[in-house]
Structures are given as C-alpha cells and as structure tokens.
Amino acid sequence: MRIAMIGSGYVGLVSGACFAQFGHDIVCVDKDADKVARLRKGEIPIYEPGLDKLVADNARAGRLSFDTGLADAVGNADAVFIAVGTPTRRGDGHADLSYVYAAAAEIAEAIRGYTVVVTKSTVPVGTGREVARIIREARPTNNFDVASNPEFLREGAAIEDFMKPDRVVIGVESQRARDVMAAVYRPLNLIQTPMVFTNIETAEVTKYAGNAFLATKITFINEIADLCEKVGADVHDVARGIGLDGRIGRKFLHPGPGFGGSCFPKDTLALAYTAREVNAPQTIVEQVIEVNNARKKRMARKVIDFCGGSVAGITIAVLGLTFKPNTDDMRDAPSLDIVPALQAAGATIVAFDPEGMKEAARMLPGVAFAGTAYEAASGADLLVVITEWHEFRGLDPRRIKELMRQPRIVDLRNIFNPDEMRDLGFAYEGIGRPRPRT
Ligand code: UDX
C-alpha cells in the first residue's frame, strides 16, 4: 500500500515508521522544512525509544521518505492519514481543529485516484464528516472516502503499542474504504489483533471514551490512596486486591501525583466540552478533571506538611520532571505545579531528569539542574521523587543518605520500599501507604 502521512509529529512519525515496517510505502509530510531536512538525515526530533532505528532502517530500505509538500505523496496514495496537532483551544477546552481542516483543504487539491482520507489525530465527534465535506466542496469530482482510525499509543512504548496493539478501531462507511483499511492493517492478522470496524462517529467517541476511562481509573486510585493514608491501609495491596478481579483489571491503578501528558488532560477536557455542547454532560469526567488538577496543586502542600509546615530556606532535590518516564515530554507534568509552589514557599530546587531537563529549563525558571540523581541529592535537605524513571529504582539509598544534609524523602511514585527506607534512617513518606505506628 502507498500511504501519505500528513504531519510528522509524534503520532505521524511513529505511525509512518511502523507502517513502513509493515512493508508499506510511506511518505511523511511536514510543513516544517527544517524538521524534514533533519528527518532526512536520520535525526529524530522527539525522544521515543527505538524510533531512530526504525526510521533509519525503513528509510534505508526505501519504504520511508519525507517531504515538505503533500501533492505528490497524496496524489500517489491509497490512503492519506491526517496526523497533525489538535491542541486545546485557549479559553474553552475545545480541541483546535484548524490544522486538521487546513490539511483536508490541501488534500482535496491533491487527490488523484480513489483515496481513503483517514483522521488519526484525536478529533472530536463530527470531525470526520466535516473533513469529508471540506474535501467534497473543494473539488466535487474527488473520488474518496473518509475513515477514522484513532491511535492508542503511549509515549515511551509507542512502537510496541503500534506493532502489537490490543485492538485497532476503524470507522468507515463504505466497503471499498473498509477493504483499503483492512489491507493497511493486514500484517496484524498474523498476531490476531482484533479489528473493530464501526461507523465514523463511533470510532471518534471510542478514542475519547478510552482515554477518559483510563484517566478516571487513575483518579479513582489516587483518591483511594488519600483514604488509605488516613486509615493506615496500603493502596498497593488495595489495587492488587481489586485489580485481580478480571472485571476491574490490574493496569492503571498506580497512585501518583496526578496524570499529565499530551493526551489525558487534553482529551478529557475536549470530551467534556463536546458532551456539554450536545447536552449530554459527562459529569464523571468533569469531576476527574477537577480532582486531578486539585491533586497536582495539593502535592506541594503534602511536601511542605511533611517538612513540618515550612520549606523556607531549604534545598530540595527533585528526581524526575517529565509527566512520566521514557519521554522528554513536559506537557501538563505534575512537576509544573509542584516545583513552582515549592519555590514560592521559599525552597531552592535542584532537579535531575534523564531526558526532560532541556524542556524543563524553559518551563521552570530558577531551578538548578544536576548531572545525576546523586549530584542532585548532594547537600539537599529533602528529596522528592516526581517521576518514576527506571534508573531511580536502582539508586543506592545508603549513598543518597550520605550525600544528603538531612535524610528525608517524599516519594510521589512509591518507587522505594517504605520499611527499608525507614530502617536505613530516612524520614520517608510515599503515597497511600501506612505510616509507621509510633
Ligand atoms: C495515553 C494513553 O495510554 C494512550 O493509549 C493514548 O493514546 C495517549 O494517552 P500517554 O499519555 O503517553 O498515553 O501515557 P500513559 O502511560 O497512559 O500515562 C498518562 C499519565 O497517567 C501519566 O502522567 C502517568 O504518570 C499517569 N499514570 C498512568 C498514573 O498516574 N498511574 C497509572 O497507573 C498509569
């Protein structure tokens, strides 16, 4: 199959490289000439494990190329995927669709033979139909169908999620478009990936419902963690105890400082907005948004309370700034609430993050950055874990204790064992775990 991928950001680049790995011919298009020039040289603008090799291998094999204009790519394609950004529109939480509609207008001018135009960007219900209208009105002779094929990629595990998905959801409304989409994903038949073929609106709702449900699950366990702290229960045992019930499932029950990232905050807001517009308010999702925002703000208070009510004048080592491990993405990261609040309360922050410090330096003024976790801990009065990078789990607590001015840890991701840390002489607090009885 020949595929044009419009937009070479996170979703476009991962999808393009993975489709090429399936054996299809892919042209990834991006308006940013500098980005395209870098991609042609094999430089990957984002951090995603394994992506550089996948891009290099497939470019070398001649299946993956990059272009700044879409005319040739679209003209030759069996399927065109729209994977441009849909940021949250300022002020009202609605997804900004201007890039999607601009792409549709350009695609309309470039279509030659029968083409399936697929939205892969996360778009509110009704967008697929609007894309179809734009393409038809621009050139009524175009021979095309639209389809919706939402992505479910997790940053840091995106290639695995693409190559071995739990399912593929495809909204189509003609047999011909269905056949094209089935051919695009045929390589997944080998691993018996379930294909959910449905109408376009259903595919669009499925994406939002999936992310909103996961965000709800996280928020639910976070509130249960608060309860556990008050009554002396352990949230991890609770999560295991409920998660073993197959109807609930064990995943996404890890408590923390609140969810962030490029998807959950944006998609929950967009879903709530769309639902209100059609008078079907999603009150649970609205609560999730509110509870999560409040939680991120409250985490600094938790740290300050742990220090006896004040962090004025102390140095705090912060480990992890990105919204989760294995990414350099800082979007809506809890650290963006926690760090400034601790600074405002008078603390000096020395931070370390394996990939996120370049981005963080822009977003967190006044923070000093260390070259390693140990360097951050040196001379600190308190250590706060905000992101659970794998390498932090292997840190030697004895060495950390020797380096710190005061051995105190607030572990917002529960990466350390509380009993072990207390036995070593740390004052330690995690999330939703019983405090030692005094
Ligand atoms: C998510 C979805 O998982 C993916 O399917 C979708 O298409 C895009 O959004 P992503 O944002 O990359 O992916 O990260 P994910 O691993 O889902 O984590 C999102 C946030 O939830 C992070 O801030 C993470 O720390 C938090 N989280 C996740 C928890 O706090 N606890 C958990 O148990 C799981």
Image (spheres, rainbow, N blue to C red):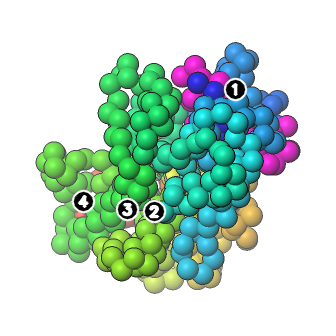
**Position of residue 129 measured from the top left corner of the image (x, y, whole percent):** 51, 58
Identify the image quadrant of residue 67: top right
Callout 4: SS: helix
Report crowding for label 4: few under 14, some 14 to 19, many 20 or more residues within 10 A (C-alpha). Answer: many
Q: Nearer the viewer, residue 286 or 142?
A: 142
Look at the image and tell me whether residue 9 can be seen: no
- Residues under numbered marks 2 and 4 in contact, where contact means CB atoms less than 8 Å apart: no
Q: CA distance from mark 3 to mark 2?
A: 15 Å
Q: Amino acid at mark 2?
A: Val
**Position of residue 69 measured from the top left corner of the image (x, y, whole percent):** 81, 42
At x 65%, y 58%, the residue is 137
Q: Quadrant of the N terminus?
A: top right
Q: Amino acid at mark 4?
A: Val
Identify the image quadrant of residue 12: top right
**Position of residue 272 measured from the top left corner of the image (x, y, whole percent):** 42, 73
At x 16%, y 49%, the residue is 247
The magenta stretch spans residue 34: yes
Callout 2: SS: loop
Q: Which residues are magenta?
A: 15-37
Residue 235 disc label: 4
Query: Mark 1 — residue?
Result: 64
Mark 3 against mark 1, which lies toward the viewer? 1
Residue 125 disc label: 2
Q: Nearer the viewer, residue 65 or 412?
A: 65
